[in-house]
Image: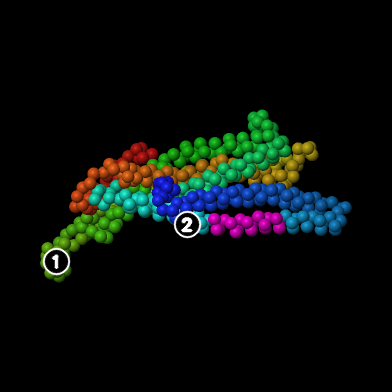
Amino acid sequence: MFAAYFCSKSRAVLATAWAGVVLVVGHACVHAWVRWAVNNFYKDFYNELENAGRLAGNSSSTDQDWHRNQHKVFMQLLEFCKIAAVSISVMPVAKFFRSVWTLRWRLALVRSYLEAWDPNTPAIEGASQRAHEDSFKWASGVELMLTTGLDCVLTLVVFCPILTRLGAETPCPAHVSMLCSLGDAWLVAFALAASLVGLAGTILVGHRLVGIEVQNQRIEAQLRRDLVILETDPSAVCQARPPPEDIVVESRDVLFFMSPLPTFLPTLALLRSNYDSLYLNFSMLNLFLACFNEAMSLAPYFLFAPSLFDPDPSKRIMLGSLIQLSDSFGRVFGAMSVLADAWGDVNVFRATVRRLREFEVDLFGGARRPTRRSTTRAKRALPFASLSMAVAEIPMDRVN
């Protein structure tokens, strides 16, 4: 799956593959810088707003003080516009070239499959879907994993030092005294502990998704294949009967095909049952992630909002510091818990990888025996009901 693109014999394909890696890394670096700049903006901007509020409550303030404060707020907004301009100009262009890079990977993969495809041997189950749809899922999944992984690593590199510095500047609340023994890194440790709890809960709730997704892809491939057979060779799917007496035909030996619905009903029922199970598991996973992520988004405010009104000036924090702390904690926690948040996509990708590995072993492993073309065509035209029963007999505990 990697060699077809990054070890291609074509220089153009090879250059595109490695240039895309450089582009993805550069885009991740720019994205990390934008987040870092916005985080610094939060602190300065909200501190200026808090100063403006205090100035409004001070009866001795002059017009000059007001104009100076307005100028500072305006400059902060101008700084944010500069950061936004970088994001607006870079991100869409990077997304376009990343999409092109992903498409080139998919085409290189399909070309390698077609080059090794032997039409004189029986095709593996769902071969057309694996070469067509699964190759697209693979390339898109790798692009998503690569960009997300780099983004998380760079986010941790940028924000862990910020969160450590904020942990040194912010008093550790008494109700988390166990973390206070870790010194300045107590906030980073808190984010790590929270992300591990979320990942454990996600794995526990969504452990069945990979097997269900593999089963689902098999049934979808089977349904798609036999719909094509129905279109090209109805006799392989539909039952035949003599023409009705009230219809005039040249010969009474001509056969009429009955509706294909009865033949498709077992697979449609199997598909519905599998999707119901998939949706139920996804719903439980999404419910858990929604509750957990909302709780973690409020955690910094529960921990530090009381410090805004602490009677001890040495323990009191400003609004800008609270916003920066909340944003930094959210970035670090989000980077550490990205696997839990994307668990559904990860399982779809894992199922795709499993199917492509099976396909490549069958395609490149040399384990298949050549047969006569007539035998191959006969196997491909098996009645759809027997294929449905074969898939229905796959126990769910074997694919989970």
Indicate the quadrant containing the C terminus: top left, top right, bottom left or bottom right.
top left
**Distance of mark 2 from mark 1, alpha carbons?**
60 Å
Question: Label 2 sits on what residue type?
Answer: Val
Q: Is residue 92 magenta?
A: yes
Q: Name the residue rendered at 77%, 55% in the picture.
A: 72
Q: Is residue 200 magenta?
A: no
* Residue tagged 1: 245
Q: Nearer the viewer, residue 66 or 266?
A: 66
Q: Position of residue 205 (x, y in %)?
A: 47, 39
* CB under 8 Å between discs 2 and 1: no
Image quadrant assignment for residue 247: bottom left
Query: At numbered mark 1, what does the secondary structure look like: helix, strand or loop?
Result: loop
Position of 270 with respect to 257 (left or right) is: right
Segment colored magenta: 77-94
Query: At numbered mark 2, what does the secondary structure look like: helix, strand or loop?
Result: helix
Q: N-terminal of the two: label 2 or label 1?
A: 2
Q: Position of residue 372 (x, y in %)?
A: 19, 50
Q: Name the residue rendered at 75%, 52% in the picture.
A: 49
Residue 378 seen in render: no
Q: Nearer the viewer, residue 399 or 137?
A: 137
Q: Position of residue 47 (x, y in %)?
A: 74, 49
Tell me which secondary structure the magenta stretch mostly adopts. Answer: helix
* Residue tagged 2: 100
Q: Position of residue 347 (x, y in %)?
A: 44, 44
Question: Label 1 sits on what residue type?
Answer: Glu
Give the colouring mode of the picture.
Answer: rainbow
Q: Name the residue rendered at 86%, 56% in the picture.
A: 62
Q: Name the residue rendered at 79%, 39% in the picture.
A: 313
